[in-house]
Each structure stands twice: as structure tokens, then as C-alpha cells.
């Protein structure tokens, strides 16, 4: 079906990706999605990582993952049957399990499968956030093929720029070969430690290289933010008064302001 059929009330699909693990990718998906949901946006999170950490962070224990994204991609399960209602109003999850390891093998070079299964959901949400695997395999390429935009969490640590440049090359290749409409939503600086000079140096270097692509909001290193996933809760439910909660509320506000600017630019 042509993409313009769902031009009204069609979800923006945002792939949250970085080929390096431990950069705050899943933390950003879970907590940005929650902050958008409490801002009265209808949000769907898709856990596309076989570790299933986004599922855990949103309170979906393994025994609750009856139907998963893997079932929809390879076992022909109806995508509607994979939806899991979280305890946050307006926030729905499609969970994942280690089943995705085999799913990735089975998909081989099928890069548009996720786009196909998501088609009927696009009219039901404002935003669909995809938590990608920390690798550039078939599943991540499926996410980039399905997405409108890519958000890149980037830790303020050594070698950060090196990995970012590699990812941007991959995004350019996907745009050329698989998804000509794919754009970079922005770079989110994470794990910022104001006591560490390196964090400030990396932050300045990234802003110098990528300018306005980098979000003003910076996600700090925060103990409460690190603790929240082990309790199956996003930071807004675990400790709304923490620095981490404040940062993700700010990020959501900045994200929505960018979305509004993009819509105004289209009209103009």
C-alpha cells in the first residue's frame, strides 16, 4: 500500500540506535516514551533487542511475554496480539525475548519485514519508538527501514565520536538503498558526569561536529536512573524527583518542540 494512505494521524516511527552497547539507548527509549505518554501522547515501544531490557524496564516480566515482536516477524502472529498494556496510561509495549536471536537468523536479508507488520498500527499512535539491538544486523536494519527518523544516544566518554561516525555512515547507506525518507532525529548526550572533564570535552566536540543535530538536553549519570530498571519501572514512576526524571521530562519537551517545528516547516 502507498505510504500516503495513512497521512492523517500517522505515527512518527523513531528508531533509537547506536551500534555500541551501554550508551543509555534502552534507558532513553523507556524514559522518553514514558515522558511523552504523560504529556498525553499515545506511544508504542517496540523492544527489538533480544536482551529484552526495554520490556523489563516497562514492567513486562518474562512470564507476561506470551506473544512478542519475534512472533509477529516470523510466526505470523497478528501484531495486535503482541501488544502489552503497561501501567503508564497512553504507553503500550511490544515485548521481546531471546527468541529474537533465531528470528534475526531466519529473516536473513529481509529488511522490510518490520515495516510490513507495523503498517496497521501507524494510525493508532502518535509515536512509535524502537529500541534497537547494539549491533548493525538484520533487526537493526529492519528498524531503520521502518523508521522515519533515528535518535542516537551518545555517551560522553572516550571513542564516542568514532562510533557515531560509523553509525552515520550506516544510516546513509540505509537511506540510499532501503529507506530514502530516513532522517536523523538528533543526538542525545547521555551519562554526563559534571565532575569529569572528559564529559565536557566530548560534549563540546560532538556539538562542534554536529551542531543543532545535538539536543540541548543532556542526560546525567544518576544512581536513581540506574536503579529504576531493576524495579521494572521508568524513572518517572520510580523517583520523579530525581535528576534523571527531570532530564527525561526536559528531553520530551525538547523532542515535541522539534516535532512541532518540523511540521511547521512542512506546511511552509
Image (cartoon, rainbow, N blue to C red):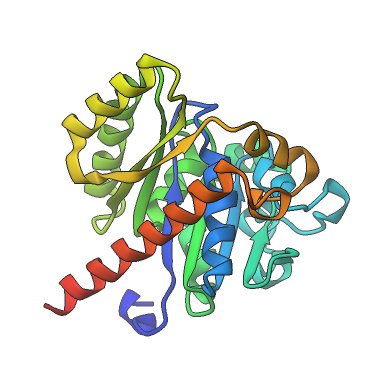
Q: Where is residue 255 in the image (x, y as percent from the top left)?
A: 37, 58
Side of 66 relative to 157 (left or right):
right
- The quadrant in which residue 117 appears is bottom right
- Can residue 117 be seen here? The reply is yes
* Residue at the image point whose x is 34% and y is 81% from the top: 7
- Can residue 130 be seen here? The reply is no
Which quadrant would the C terminus be assigned to in this image?
A: bottom left
Nearest to the observer: residue 159 or residue 80? 159
User: Is 50 above or below relative to 256?
Assistant: above
- The quadrant in which residue 102 appears is top right
Q: Where is residue 182 in the image (x, y as percent from the top left)?
A: 29, 54
Nearest to the observer: residue 119 or residue 22? 22
* Residue at the image point whose x is 25% and y is 48% from the top: 175
User: Is 212 above or below relative to 123?
Assistant: above
Nearest to the observer: residue 109 or residue 147? 147
* Residue ranking furthest to the right: 63
Which quadrant would the N terminus be assigned to in this image?
A: bottom left
Q: Where is residue 39 in the image (x, y as percent from the top left)?
A: 52, 70
Q: Where is residue 198 in the image (x, y as percent from the top left)?
A: 36, 15
* Residue at the image point whose x is 46% and y is 24% from the top: 193
Nearest to the observer: residue 122 or residue 249? 249
Side of 248 relative to 54 (left or right):
left
User: Is 5 above or below relative to 136?
Assistant: below
Side of 135 relative to 165 (left or right):
right
User: Is 155 above or below relative to 4?
Assistant: above
* Residue at the image point whose x is 52% and y is 35% from the top: 24
Amino acid at each position: 500500500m502507498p505510504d500516503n494512505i495513512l497521512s492523517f494521524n500517522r505515527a512518527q516511527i523513531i528508531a533509537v540506535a547506536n551500534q555500541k552497547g551501554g550508551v543509555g539507548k534502552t534507558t532513553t527509549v523507556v524514559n522518553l516514551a514514558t515522558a511523552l505518554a504523560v504529556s498525553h501522547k499515545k506511544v508504542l515501544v517496540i523492544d527489538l533487542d533480544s536482551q529484552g531490557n526495554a520490556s523489563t524496564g516497562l514492567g513486562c516480566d518474562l512470564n507476561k511475554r506470551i506473544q512478542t515482536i519475534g512472533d509477529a516477524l516470523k510466526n505470523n502472529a497478528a501484531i495486535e496480539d503482541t501488544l502489552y498494556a503497561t501501567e503508564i496510561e497512553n504507553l503500550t509495549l511490544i515485548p521481546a525475548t531471546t527468541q529474537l536471536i533465531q528470528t534475526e537468523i531466519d529473516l536473513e536479508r529481509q529488511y522490510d519485514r518490520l515495516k510490513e507488520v507495523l503498517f496497521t498500527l501507524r494510525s493508532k499512535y502518535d509515536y512509535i519508538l524502537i529500541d534497537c539491538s547494539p549491533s548493525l544486523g538484520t533487526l537493526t536494519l529492519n528498524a531503520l527501514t521502518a523508521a522515519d527518523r533515528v535518535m542516537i544516544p551518545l555517551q560522553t566518554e572516550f571513542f564516542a565520536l568514532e562510533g557515531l561516525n560509523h553509525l552515520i555512515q550506516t544510516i546513509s547507506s540505509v537511506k540510499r538503498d532501503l529507506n530514502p525518507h530516513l532522517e536523523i532525529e538528533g543526538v542525545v548526550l547521555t551519562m554526563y558526569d559534571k565532575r569529569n572533564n572528559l564529559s565536557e570535552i566530548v560534549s563540546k566536540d560532538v556539538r562542534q561536529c554536529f551542531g543543532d543535530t545535538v539536543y540541548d538536553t543532556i542526560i546525567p549519570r544518576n544512581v536513581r536512573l540506574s536503579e529504576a530498571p531493576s524495579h521494572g519501572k521508568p524513572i518517572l514512576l520510580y523517583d520523579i524527583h530525581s535528576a534523571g526524571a527531570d532530564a527525561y521530562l526536559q528531553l520530551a519537551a525538547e523532542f515535541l518542540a522539534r516535532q512541532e517545528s518540523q511540521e511547521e516547516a512542512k506546511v511552509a
